[in-house]
Image: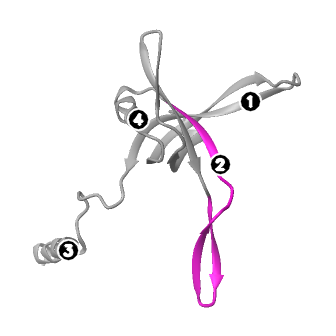
Amino acid sequence: MAYNCKIELNGNLGADAKLLEKEGKNFVALRIATRDSYPVKEGDTTIWKDSKNTLWHDVLVFRPNAVAIASKLVKGDRVEIIGSLSYRPFTDENGHKKQQATIIASLINKVEFGSTDNPSDEEISAIADEAENIAA
């Protein structure tokens, strides 16, 4: 991965993952939607509001472990991606040369809210108390 153009992206899939094969190798194509947030001051508090603009990102996944995860994703899934940018030149319908950016994902994770794997507040408190007792 090119570390000078590292990308971290959180968003939702706009379509089911598309498993493709070329020259005997599997890869996955994803289309991910993101929306920016911005702070708004309301009285003494600050709340975060979502932008009305949705941005779409093309993502390709080549690493075998990431392909195994990505191939099971479906429209609407929330994902976290770490990767890098790749630019591909093309000529538009008017003959102008342009470049299209694609994210090449090296790591991908499905984000699941309300997962039972996460400890409860009581479990976190008990673990913190136990850690304090060990440290004392």
In the shown orientation, is residue 55 left or right of residue 109?
Answer: right
Q: Position of residue 89 (x, y in %)?
A: 73, 24
- Magenta stretch in the rendered image: 36-60
Amino acid type shown at disc 4: Ala
Q: Position of residue 134 (x, y in %)?
A: 10, 73
Q: Position of residue 103 (x, y in %)?
A: 57, 36
Which badge, 2 or 4, comes first in the chain's sequence?
2
Residue 55: which numbered mark, if any?
2
Which badge, 2 or 1, comes first in the chain's sequence?
2
| Residue beneath disc 3 | 128
Dots 3, 4 in contact, CB < 8 A: no
Q: Secondary structure at mark 4?
A: helix
Rounded to the nearest whole Å, what is the CA distance between mark 3 and mark 4?
35 Å
Q: Secondary structure at mark 3?
A: helix
Decide whether the magenta segment is chiefly helix, strand or loop: strand
Up-down: is 26 above or below 70? above
Which badge, 4 or 1, comes first in the chain's sequence?
4
Up-down: is 60 above or below 133? above
Mark 2, mark 1: which one is toward the viewer?
A: 2
In terms of image quadrants, where is residue 136? Answer: bottom left
Which badge, 3 or 4, comes first in the chain's sequence?
4
Rounded to the nearest whole Å, what is the CA distance between mark 2 and mark 4?
20 Å
Q: Secondary structure at mark 2?
A: strand
In the shown orientation, is residue 68 left or right of residue 86?
Answer: left
Residue 71: which numbered mark, if any?
none
| Mark 4 Cα shell of 10 Å, populated few (<14), some (14-19), many (≥20) | many
| Residue beneath disc 4 | 70
Residue 55 is a magenta residue: yes
